[in-house]
Image: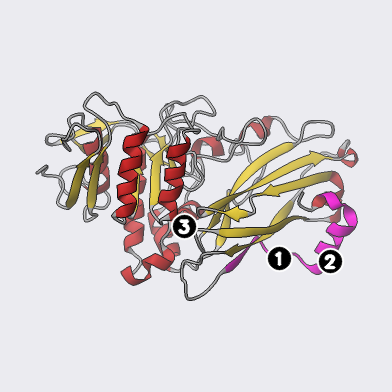
C-alpha cells in the first residue's frame, strides 16, 4: 500500500486467511511492476488498473481452493486480464482446470508463465499448457532460449496422441529490473518475469481498440491470434517447443487488431518437418515407409465466439503424386470451447513412398461456425486455409478415402 511505483491500484484482496494483502516476499510486487509501474523501473502499461489478489502466504504456501475463490471473484468483478506468474506440473487438478476454462469463457484473457523447469522437454507448467491460455517462455538478452525456461510439448494427450505445440510466445526473462516490494528496483530472472511483460503488452493491445468495440473484438482467442500471427521467430534457433511462435511484435499486433474481423485460425499455421531446427525432433527422424506415423496436435482458435463447431476437415494434397505417397488421418474436437479446439494430424508413408526421397505437401481445409457469436447482432463462420478447386476435391475422392477425416 502506498508504493511509489503504482498510481492506479484499485483493490487488494487476501485469499490466504492471513488477513493481510501486503506482499512481504517481493514476487508479486515485481510482477505488478512489470505490468504497470509508473516510476523508476517502468512497466508496459502504467495506466492499467491493478487489482491485486494475494494467494500465497508469507511462507509461499498456497492451495487450489484459494485460487478458486480468487478466480471466482475475478469473474464476479469483470476483470479483463489476469497474470499468473505461477504454475505447477499437475495438469489433472480438475477443479482448477475447470475454473480456468470458466474464467476464459467469461472473456477474461489469462497469461501464464510456462515454468522454470527447462531445459528438459515436456516440462511445461499448468495452466500455461492449456490451449485457451497464453503460455509464455523466457529468453536471454542475446535472444537465445533461457536454459531454465520450460519446454513443450504438452503432456495432456500422451500416450494416446501427440502433445500440442507450446509455449505460445517467449520474451525477456533474465536479469530484468522491476519494482522492489519496499522501494526502488531489483533484478529478477524467470518466466515469472516474462509473463507480466506479455500481460502488459496485452493491456496495451486492448487499449488501441475503442472501448465501444472491445467486447466484439477483444477476447482470449483474438488476442492470441494477433500476437502469434505477428510474432517474430528468434534469429538464433530454438525449436517450436522452445520458442513457440517467437517474440511478440507489439506494433504489428496492434495494427492487425485494429483491422481484425472475428475469424478462426490454427496454430501453428504451418507444419514443415524440413524446417530445422525449428520443427524439433522430427528433423532428425524423417518419415519413411514402415516407420511409425508422424503425429501433430494443432490448436484451433475461434475468435468468433466462446463456443463453436469444427466441420469436417479434409486434407488436400498439393499434387496427385503427393496423394499417392502418404495416408493422412484427421481427428478433431467437434466443439470449440472456450475459444479453442483441437485438430490432430497423423501422417503415414505408403508403400509407394518406399523409394521416394523428397517433400510431400498439402493443406487442411475446414469450416468453423460460432454458436455464440461475440457480436450478438450477427453470426459468423470462418474457413481455415484456402478453398481447393473442384478438381482437387475430386482428386482426393478418387485417390483414397483415407484422405478424408476419420
Magenta stretch containing residue 387, yes or no? yes
Q: Cβ–Cβ below 8 Å for labels 3 and 2?
A: no
**Residue 186 image point, x, y percent:** 20, 32
Q: Is residue 239 visible?
A: no
Question: What separation in Å lies between label 3 and label 2 (alpha carbons)?
Answer: 33 Å
**Pointer 1: residues within 10 angstroms few (<14), some, or many (20+)?**
some
Q: Cβ–Cβ below 8 Å for labels 1 and 3?
A: no
Question: What separation in Å lies between label 2 and label 1 (alpha carbons)?
Answer: 11 Å
Q: Residue at x 31, y 29 (%)?
A: 62
Q: Height in image: 333 above or below 124?
A: below
Q: Which of marks 1 and 3 is nearer the N terminus?
A: 3
* Residue 387 tag number: 1
Q: Residue at x 53, y 34 (%)?
A: 152
Q: Residue at x 46, y 43 (%)?
A: 98
What element does badge 2 sit on?
helix
Q: Residue at x 34, y 71 (%)?
A: 212
What element does badge 3 sit on?
helix
Q: In which quarter of the image is residue 100?
A: top left
The N terminus, quarter of image: top left
Q: Can residue 39 be seen in this view?
A: yes
Which range is magenta? 381-402
**Residue 271 image point, x, y percent:** 65, 46
* Foreground residue among 106 and 22: 106
Which residue is tagged 3? 226
* Residue 391 tag number: 2
Amino acid at each position: 500500500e502506498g508504493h511509489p511505483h503504482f498510481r492506479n491500484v484499485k483493490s487488494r484482496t487476501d485469499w490466504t486467511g492471513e488477513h493481510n494483502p501486503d506482499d512481504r516476499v517481493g514476487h508479486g510486487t515485481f510482477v505488478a511492476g512489470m505490468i504497470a509501474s509508473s516510476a523508476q523501473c517502468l512497466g508496459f502499461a502504467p495506466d492499467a488498473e491493478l487489482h491485486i489478489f494475494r494467494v500465497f502466504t508469507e511462507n509461499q504456501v498456497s492451495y487450489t481452493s484459494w485460487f478458486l475463490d480468487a478466480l471466482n471473484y475475478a469473474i464476479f468483478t469483470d476483470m479483463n486480464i489476469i497474470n499468473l506468474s505461477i504454475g505447477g506440473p499437475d495438469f489433472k487438478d480438475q477443479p482448477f482446470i475447470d475454473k480456468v476454462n470458466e474464467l476464459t469463457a467469461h472473456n477474461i484473457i489469462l497469461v501464464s508463465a510456462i515454468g522454470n523447469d527447462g531445459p528438459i522437454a515436456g516440462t511445461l507448467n499448468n495452466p500455461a499448457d492449456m490451449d485457451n491460455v497464453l503460455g509464455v517462455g523466457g529468453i536471454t538478452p542475446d535472444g537465445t532460449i533461457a536454459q531454465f525456461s520450460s519446454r513443450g510439448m504438452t503432456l495432456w494427450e500422451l500416450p494416446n496422441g501427440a502433445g500440442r505445440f507450446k509455449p505460445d510466445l517467449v520474451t525477456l526473462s533474465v536479469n530484468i529490473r522491476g519494482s522492489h516490494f519496499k522501494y526502488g528496483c531489483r533484478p529478477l530472472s524467470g518466466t515469472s518475469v516474462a509473463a507480466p511483460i506479455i500481460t502488459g503488452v496485452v493491456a496495451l493491445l486492448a487499449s488501441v481498440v475503442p472501448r465501444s468495440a472491445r467486447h466484439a473484438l477483444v477476447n482470449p482467442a483474438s488476442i492470441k491470434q494477433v500476437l502469434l500471427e505477428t510474432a517474430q521467430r528468434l534469429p538464433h534457433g530454438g525449436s517450436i517447443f522452445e520458442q513457440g511462435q517467437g517474440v511478440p511484435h507489439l506494433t504489428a499486433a496492434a495494427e492487425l487488431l485494429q483491422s481484425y474481423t472475428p475469424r478462426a485460425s490454427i496454430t501453428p499455421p504451418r507444419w514443415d518437418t524440413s524446417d530445422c531446427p525449428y520443427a524439433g525432433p522430427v528433423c532428425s527422424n524423417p518419415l519413411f515407409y514402415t516407420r511409425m506415423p508422424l503425429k501433430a496436435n494443432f490448436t484451433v482458435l475461434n475468435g468468433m465466439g466462446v463456443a463453436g463447431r469444427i466441420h469436417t476437415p479434409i486434407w488436400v494434397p498439393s499434387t496427385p503424386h503427393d496423394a499417392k505417397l502418404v495416408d493422412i488421418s484427421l481427428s478433431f474436437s467437434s466443439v470449440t470451447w472456450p475459444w479453442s479446439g483441437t485438430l490432430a494430424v497423423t501422417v503415414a508413408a505408403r508403400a509407394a513412398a518406399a523409394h521416394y526421397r523428397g517433400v510431400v505437401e498439402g493443406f487442411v481445409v475446414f469450416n468453423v461456425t460460432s454458436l455464440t457469436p461475440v457480436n450478438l447482432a450477427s453470426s459468423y463462420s470462418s474457413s481455415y486455409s484456402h478453398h481447393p478447386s473442384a478438381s482437387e476435391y475430386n482428386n482426393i475422392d478418387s485417390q483414397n478415402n483415407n484422405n478424408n477425416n476419420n
